Image: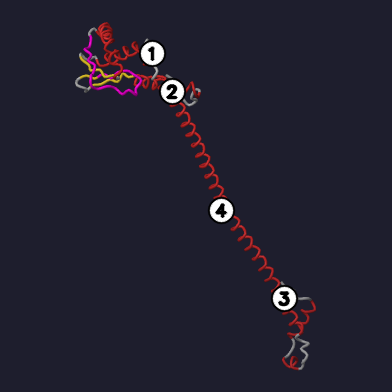
Amino acid sequence: MSFIRGEQIDDFIELENLRPQDLINDPTHTLLRPILSHIDAEAEDKSMEMELRAEEEFRAEKRRIFKENRERIDLFYERKRKQVDIAHKVYTSNKSNESRVSLLIARDQLLQDVLKEAQEELKTVSGDKEKYPKIIKGLILQGILQLLEPEVVLRCRKEDVELIKDVVDEVADDQKKIAGFSTKVTVDPNNFLSDEIAGGVELLSRQGKISVSSTLESRMNLIAEQIVPQIRTALFGPNPNRAFFD
């Protein structure tokens, strides 16, 4: 904003009293100089004011653009950070699951190795001439008591045929004491169990419609299913996530 000095006011007062003829007679424009100076000063003030205003608007716009870009960048990196966090959690979870699965597989393999070793030991049972007759007698009796049929056909390994013929009468006596009657047992002369099994018998009744496996392997598998939890505990310790125990 411009201000007019006191002497300029006096000059303006004189100019108001000028006549057109006075301006014509003033070739050096002495009388116009005050007003021209005022116009120049006013223009300079306006120019400075416009520059200051433009500078302020420029700074305000620059701050606005900077703020918007900063917010945009912050938002971009925040999203990236969340993506990295999620990816890290997924990676950690996958690795944890992989480790857990690997551990479970290793434990299961060790358990299978223990059971396989037990199966190998099972093959030596039939070689014990003192214990095996008692064992096979018990297996036949268990099978007959499961069926409780008047007649059964018995299948066994070919090498056990004579042994079984020797014990069937004792089995009949034991059954009669337990069940009150005895079952007629016929050894199948044509069909035999595989020589690969450790021993035992298979009993069939009603023309083969009902059968009971009473081999050493089947009994061991049955026992293994019952004691696997105890084997796991013995091998790996108690399960901290298990709330109930048999």
Task: Give, as a three-letter code, the residue at label 4.
Answer: Phe
Q: In this view, does 182 lie above or below 2?
A: above
Looking at the rendered structure, the secondary structure element under dot 4 is helix
The label nearer to you, 2 versus 1, is 1
List the residue tagged with mark 3: 44
List the residue tagged with mark 4: 76
Q: Is residue 227 above or below residue 23?
A: above
Q: Which of marks 3 and 1 is nearer the N terminus?
A: 3
Q: Earlier in the sequence, mark 2 or mark 3?
A: 3
Front position in the image: 21 or 172? 172
Q: Which of marks 4 and 3 is nearer the N terminus?
A: 3
Task: Give, as a three-letter code, the residue at label 2.
Answer: Glu
> In 3D space, how far apart are the residues under numbered discs 2 and 1 (Cα atoms)?
18 Å
Magenta region: which residues? Answer: 182-203
- In the rendering, at what x and y percent does residue 42 appear? 71, 76
Looking at the rendered structure, the secondary structure element under dot 1 is loop
Q: Write the residue at 72% across / 91% down.
A: 20
List the residue tagged with mark 2: 117
Few, some or many C-alpha atoms within 10 Å of disc 1 (few <14, some 14-19, many ≥20)? few
Q: Quadrant location of residue 215?
A: top left
